[in-house]
Amino acid sequence: MKGKRKWLLCPLIVVALLLCAIPAYADMPTLPHAFYGTLTIAGSPAAVGTVVTAEVDEVQCGSITTTVAGQYGGSGAFDEKLTVTGEIETGAAISFFVNDAPVGDTYDYAFSPGAVTEHNMVVSEDLEPPVVDITPLSPDPTNDNTPTFTGTAIDTLSNIASVEYQVGTGSWRVWVMATAADGAFDSPSESYTFTIPALADGGYTVYVRATDAASPPNTTAEENHASDSFTIDTAAPTVVSTFPASGETGVAVDTVVTATFSERMDETTITTGSFTLDGVAGSVSYDFGTYTATFTPDAHLTEGTTYTATLTTAVTDAASNAIGAEYSWSFTTTGDDTTPPTVSSTSPVADATDVAVGSNITATFSEAMDESTITTGSFTVAGVSGSVSYNSVTYTATFNPASNLAYETIYTASLSTAITDAAGNPLASTYSWSFTTEDDPGVIPGDANGDGVVDILDVTKTERIIVMLDAETPGADANEDGVVDILDVTKIERIIALLD
């Protein structure tokens, strides 16, 4: 009897233990439903990196990224799978998405906790939204207020439903369909071209997007949009200021003439042909930073003369808009100059020593001079013959000695009151200064002209001495026999030929 009781007691203990465990099992989470299978998009295996997701009641509850083309997950026990998990009721509809685009109701599947299901998906349409690019065909800035744009839709054009654009100065505008009238599609090159309707002058941004039947447009974000900024400029440039001003008098003769424009100009159109000063040769330049064109005369203007500067309609802005009409203005140079000119510098300077015997003598004046008054009669060096010239740009007169100066000699240069400025005002008084030449380096046999070298010039000098056309010099006695004769010419020639 006791044995039977023990046997009956065992089942009761087991039932009691099971009843105690029931609440613990009720709190356990729902088992997941795992999926794997093949994935084909538009007849081709889905690319590696394609994202497959699952949703239940519009809540994402699983995701996997393909690592093998045409397949998501694997059938092996340890292969990764698309695991649908969460507080989901058995039989709930699972919706699948590929790259965030819905696959469709055809592929909805009932949730079964703990199940592992091979679910092969075939997507017949292209789920990738077309990506667009854009290039403005018109220049920037442009004087055409109907700019044309072109771009490439990275998709087959047979799939593209539309190309749309919007244009504005800041915030997004309403999308406008690019129709056949705008240029529409160019199928052979899989590109689109369209022309924006006429716009007012100003800066704009154009945005473009393409859509296809499987991909409704994203109207809020800039994903899959292309954009470009451009400027419409149809206004003619104007001249805002000139120098000298129109009608100005008393203008200095060394003035450069300038014109400042209202906007950036095309430098290539501003030339000596389109920016002129009547009767004056010169050069033309343009400054991008200040929009200023400058005419620089080759020489000083004439005193008391009226000049007219002209800009022709060949001058255009950067958008090729020409100035509205030829622009001219006049001014008059000073004619009331009664101030005598002065000598601002000399070379050699006054009281200079050790001056090279081959030097020229120069004098620079304080203003433009009358070149005709600077002659060998008004600019002299005592005891020296030579020629005189004048540089109208630097106001410098130059005395060029006919031969080298003598060594260790004091020379005095003079400028007489016959010299006048461009207005006819003479020097207030004769201007003179002195200088001393360098020491004699010694007699070089054969150096007949004393320039420190023996060359063909010394042959000529010696021949002139022999026929008594020049005075005898120590260096002319090349063979040092006490007389200058034909033997010295032969000696010099041998020295030149490095035979002596």
Image (cartoon, grey):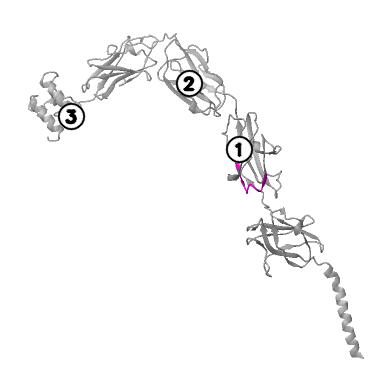
Counting from the top left corner in percent of width and height, residue 363 is at 33, 18
Q: Which of label 1 and label 2 is nearer to you? A: 1
Q: Badge 3: how crowded within 10 Å, few (<14), some, or many (20+)? A: some
- Which of 244/442 is in front? 244
Mark with earlier residue (2, 3): 2
**Distance between the alpha carbons at the discs numbered 3 and 1:** 76 Å
Say which residue appears at 49% left-offset and 18% top-offset: 310
Q: Which mark is residue 149?
A: 1
Counting from the top left corner in percent of width and height, residue 19 is at 87, 74
Magenta stretch encompasses residue 154: yes
Say which residue appears at 76% left-offset and 62% top-offset: 85
446 to the left or right of 134: left
Q: Badge 1: how crowded within 10 Å, few (<14), some, or many (20+)? A: some
- Which of 391/95 is in front? 95
Give the extent of the magenta segment.
151-161
- Which of 186/318 is in front? 186
Q: Which mark is residue 299?
A: none
